[in-house]
Amino acid sequence: MRVRGSDTSRLRRINMVTALRALRGQGAIGLTELAQRAELSRPTVEGLAEDLLALGWLAESPPETGRMGRPRRLFRFRAEAGHVLGVDIGSYSVRALVCDLEGQVVGRFSTRLAPQASRVDRLEAVRTAAGGALKDAGIEPDRLMATCVGTTGVVRDGAVKLSVALPEWTGVNLVAELGADFGPVVLVENDCNLAALAERWTGVAKDARDLVFVLSGVRTGAGLLIRGELHGGGRGMAGEIGALPLLGWHRAPSHLAGFPGLPAETAAEEVAGLVFSAAREGDPAARWAVEQYAHDLAEGIAALVLTMDPDLVVIGGGVSRSGDVLLEPLRRHLDPLCLEPPELAVSSLGEKAVVLGAVRHALDHVDARLYDVDGALPEAGPA
């Protein structure tokens, strides 16, 4: 790139971002190694390191001991310079995590609530969980660089446009509701999409660019990644295969709920675990329920596979704890519906997938700001 005299400040910004990228995630390294990683001269990197130290994004580590000669200066990225908050709003619980800028958990909290809870009660549970995680981390809300909230339903522009799973939830604007408490940046995303993001970040889908994540339990939904990016569609409805009556997702849970061996008044979130456990032990009625469940689940998955041709299909949600029972009948019903059998895997993140995806989405927002060569690098938080 040719840079005129008036562009030197932008060139310095580009070099600063390059150095920050080269250092992040590497631990403590010296200026020579940093210059090599950034492909910049050592004098340039030394000046950039001083600037980043002043802004609070780098810290100088103690020099190595036992080396001959002048101790070399070591620098590390200050992951503690900022924090993000991830929240998962579920039917039966709300989970919250506070993480530093390397994604390390520093605070957590969860709270239970009834599936029929009102909008007011569910929002209060969100504030309780988020506030509890912040307290656990010792972080004030004004220290947050971004908050991401995951919720069931069709999400667009920070609001839930449609929700059939949660009472009084259609129309709730989560940005407006939570911005004053956990601002200045509040992001809202569909829970299935966030679970897909988490699986690619730290789960079984690290090598998958095109991914279908099927969140199945009390309800069934899908999150999509295309070329590693979330795909929600123009109106937030991508992956809502369950809305099509011709496919079996709307009736799949009824096969598990109809298992005659369930104890009276079994809570809905416990049904799948009990049925799969009975099937694992060889109960014929339970095995038949799982067979029918797999049949209906396969119809919707096949529609997504034939549309997207993904690298991987991940099964998550409540049934992920029973992959040893589910995968065989699911493969048997799915493979004949596809031109080529897709690769299947069971989520390794279980119930943590959505909240971890919320953390990752918030971190991606922070990264976009840090690495924006046309913006001003913000000052970091206090030590």
Image (cartoon, rainbow, N blue to C red):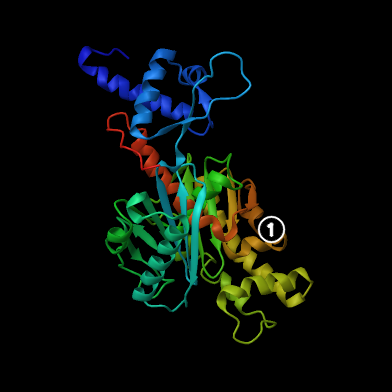
In the image: residue 298, left or right of residue 58: right
Near-viewer residue (363 or 20) = 20
Q: What is the three-letter code of the residue carrying label 1?
A: Leu
| Residue 96 shows in this picture | yes
Q: Please tell me in which quadrant of the rendered image residue 59 appears.
A: top left
Q: Position of residue 41 (x, y in %)?
A: 43, 13
Local secondary structure at mark 1: helix
In the image: residue 129, left or right of residue 325: left
| Residue 309 shows in this picture | no
- Of the 4 image quadrants, the one containing the N terminus is top left
In the image: residue 240, left or right of residue 323: left
- Of the 4 image quadrants, the one containing the C terminus is top left
Near-viewer residue (187 or 345) = 187
Q: Residue at x 71, y 74 (%)?
A: 286
**How many badges with numbers are in the image?**
1
Identify the residue position indicated by label 1 in the image.
327
